[in-house]
Amino acid sequence: MRLQRYLAALISGFLFGAISATSTHAADQKQQNSRPQRIITVAPHLSEIVEAAGGAERLVSVSAYSNYPPLVKKLPVTSDARSIDLERMKQLQPDLIIYWRSGTPETQIESIKKTFIDKSSQDGRLVKVISVEPKKLVDIAQDIETVGKALGTEKMAQKNAQLLRTEIKKLKDQYQNSQKRKVRVFYQVWAQPLMTLNQDHLIADIIQICGGEQLFANEKLLVPTVSKEAVVKANPEIIFTAVDSPEFKTDWSMWSSIPQLAATQKKAFVDIDGDMISRPSPRIMQGAQKICQAIDRVR
């Protein structure tokens, strides 16, 4: 009798465990299925953030000039810096749209929200619209975690975010040294008209981390126009600019023809691949490393 009771209890416990495990699995599956599965990004770097968060395979559309990870090159383009294709977006039935707050025109943001936010997708999911706004290198790690939380891929997102934070710390430890003098840096956004960046831009954070003194950092506009005479007077020791591809070489004659300029004397004119410095994604660390090394060479 005791043996029968034991076997009955054992079988009952096994069945209860199996049912509990099945129920837990079903709940996990249901939660996963409720997560966004069709993502549209509205800035080139956002496909890279989604990839770092562990959701690249869920992308269904990207913005113009998106090229990383490589799989996005095959996806339809539904936006660029000036316009969005709302009809095409609707056809793709997204359940998550991610935009860059300061990099997306306000009219586009309002159109996206009005068309999609809290509307139901084809499979019944409510469409989510979220934004990111990195101002510092460490904010990129937070963006990865934010997207990972929305996708239900927290573990992957946290892992890659922490890797990025570790890289940033290494850069600071190596170059942000109070014992080293600061180098006067001019970052040229555009030559005609001559434009630069103020201290609120992400690149300003990189320059500061690398031990540079950013010229015109206190200008009110994020991308101010400055005069050639003002730059010469400030006498930068090194000048950076972003280029469309590593093969492209900037015409530096506007500056190199001025012999008294410190940057001319040091031959410190540096092209940075735009994909590696203008996009707030993990790949920006490659551009940051190049800026730090170049500043250190002229110190």
Image (tube, rainbow, N blue to C red):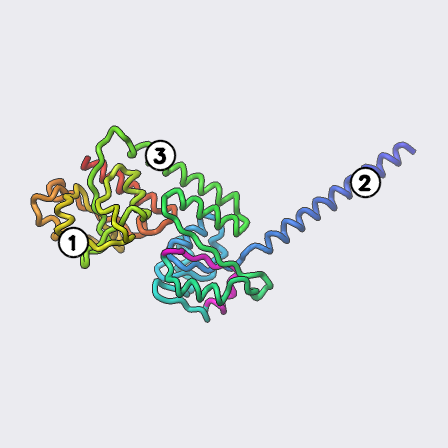
Q: Secondary structure at mark 1?
A: loop
Quadrant into which the N terminus falls: top right
Above/below status of 159 relative to 38: above
What residue is disc 3 on? 170
Q: Pick whichever of labels 3 and 1 is earlier in the sequence.
A: 3
Q: Nearer the viewer, residue 198 or 92?
A: 198
Mark 3 vs mark 1, CA separation in Å: 36 Å
Left or right: residue 170 versus residue 30 is left
On the image, the x and y values in percent for residue 57 come to 49, 55
Query: Cβ–Cβ below 8 Å for labels 1 and 2?
Result: no
User: How many C-alpha atoms fall within 10 Å of the one at disc 1: few (<14), some, or many (≥20)?
Assistant: few
Above/below status of 11 relative to 68: above
Q: Nearer the viewer, residue 223 or 88?
A: 223
Q: Residue sitting at 21 percent across and 32 percent down?
A: 181
Q: Residue sitting at 61 percent across and 52 percent down?
A: 31
Q: Nearer the viewer, mark 1 or mark 2?
A: 1
Mark 1 vs mark 2, CA separation in Å: 84 Å
Query: Cβ–Cβ below 8 Å for labels 2 and 3?
Result: no
Q: Nearer the viewer, residue 40 or 6?
A: 40
Instruction: Say what amino acid the circle numbered 3 marks.
Output: Lys
Is 273 covered by the magenta stretch? no
What residue is disc 1 on? 227
User: How many C-alpha atoms fall within 10 Å of the one at disc 3: few (<14), some, or many (≥20)?
Assistant: few
Left or right: residue 138 versus residue 270 is right
What residue is disc 2 on? 11
**Which quadrant of the figure has residue 179?**
top left
Start and end of the magenta stretch? Answer: 89-102
